[in-house]
Image (cartoon, rainbow, N blue to C red):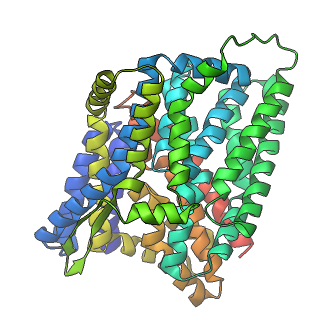
Amino acid sequence: MDIFLASLPILTLIILMGVFKMPGDRSSVITLIVTALVAAFGFSFPAIDISFSFLYGMGKALFPILFIILMAIYSYNVLLQTGKIDVLREQFSNLAADRSVQVLLITWGFGGLLEGMAGFGTAVAIPAAILISLGYKPVFSALVSLLANSVPTAFGAVGVPVIVLSQETGLPLQHLSVSVVIQLSALMILIPMVITFLTDSSGKALWKNLTLSILVGIVSLVVQYVSARYIGAETPAILGAIASIAVIIGAGKFIDRKKPRSKSHLSAKETLSAWSVYGLILVLVLITSPLIPAVRNALSSVCVTTFPFVIQGHAKPLTIQWLTQGGILLFLGSFLGGLIQGASVGSLFTCLSRTVVQMWRTAVTVICLVGFSTIMELSGMTPVLAIALATATGSLYPLFAPAIGALGTFLTGSDTSANIMFGKLQASVGTQIGVSPDWLAAANTAGATGGKIISPQSIAIATSACNDQGREGAILKRALPYALAYVIITGLAVYIFA
């Protein structure tokens, strides 16, 4: 009965979004109510703790998730307002006239770079918005952006998920990093392959797509492995994305060598102006990242706000370090870039207010989703599901270990949160069944990257970026088979090499 009750909120959300195709905001509100009732009557979780759990979850939803989503969409809206999106559109078209190359460049290459440096939804929102501007359909743009945002998530936001996993479990960071790369190695080839085939499934594109995917995947794998082994957890996603971008552009020129190419009439000044928003964002993210610890530590100690929450006698402080907050960095890059592009201060603030109005459905969805997942975690529902799966699988546990990580990301929308929730559990089960704790803890992160594909929060970000709110159920239905296959492949890799 405990297992059934614990799974009831998840089943409710899936049925409402996937079967009844109810919009994300309504589905999440109903799921939140169901979760609160189950916590109160099924798990004897006091009403006061339910209330504080929701408020704590709402705080986590606002900072950093919604703040970053808002500013990621704002960065795109600034480009729309200044008209510089036309310049970027022309440049992406010139870099890659072939549709498969173009989509892979924007989602896997540029999106992977955004994930590596910023994370928290930017790698879904910005690529999806750019694809829309290039004329791709909203559901397609959302789907390929979600798929591309899977593998890089393991080392997203400058390696935060794996670093947190190491801190939670006490396991060596390098061993965890290398294990994650090995477990995801096949998917580094398969995900680009799926993206290219979704873009162009014609028979004549078969060998082109295969060759491009294998080439990009192998380069990503080699660079990420070397980075994880010899540099650190902060760099695999970033360096892997940069290497992928170089390979995709090179392959694109070879594929398009016989096609007539229009010459660009853009000056260097126009090009730099068009890229000033994203260029400034990347510079600000790098400067304040763990790659420059002196700067990050200095900024982290200034302008810090802490909200104290006490739930069931345990302190749950919510701390916001404003000067290293991703949303602030996105805002500064977007605002300053907009000024460089010729926009006035007043028009940029007007653009921001329009973006806030555009985001209201997404805000309701994400607040309720993080709220219900926080109630599930603190009331004991989430651990019940994880332990039940571990108990039911026995010696086959490594096969199912990634599914627990995927569950964590599905619920929280964050690989980092999934590692906080289940990292210790995975390591302790590994010790009990005679499997390396490093390997199973890494499996939590590897599986969590698959859960990212169908995380309702990620889907809400995608629909918001595509201005297609209300279609969350349709996107979930399209993405679900890919996410299931992803987790199965990861499970096989973990089990075979355990």
Residue 420 figure quarter: bottom left
**Depth order, front residue of 270/392:** 270
Q: Where's residue 393, x and y in %?
A: 55, 76
Position of 424 relative to 248 (above/below): below
**The quarter of the displayed image where residue 318 is located:** bottom left
**Is residue 425 toward the left or the right of residue 199 in the image?**
left
Q: Is residue 430 left or right of residue 11?
A: right
Q: Is residue 184 found left or right of 129 in the rendered image? A: right
Q: Is residue 259 visible?
A: yes
Q: Quadrant of the C terminus?
A: bottom right
Quadrant position of residue 356: top left
Q: Is residue 93 above or below residue 123?
A: above
Looking at the picture, how far across and down is residue 338, in whole percent? 43, 27
Residue at position x 72%, y 24% in the image: 95
Quadrant that contains the N terminus: bottom left
Residue positioned 32% across, 25% down in the render: 345
Q: Is residue 451 above or below residue 442?
A: above
Q: State the residue at coordinates (66%, 67%).
A: 232
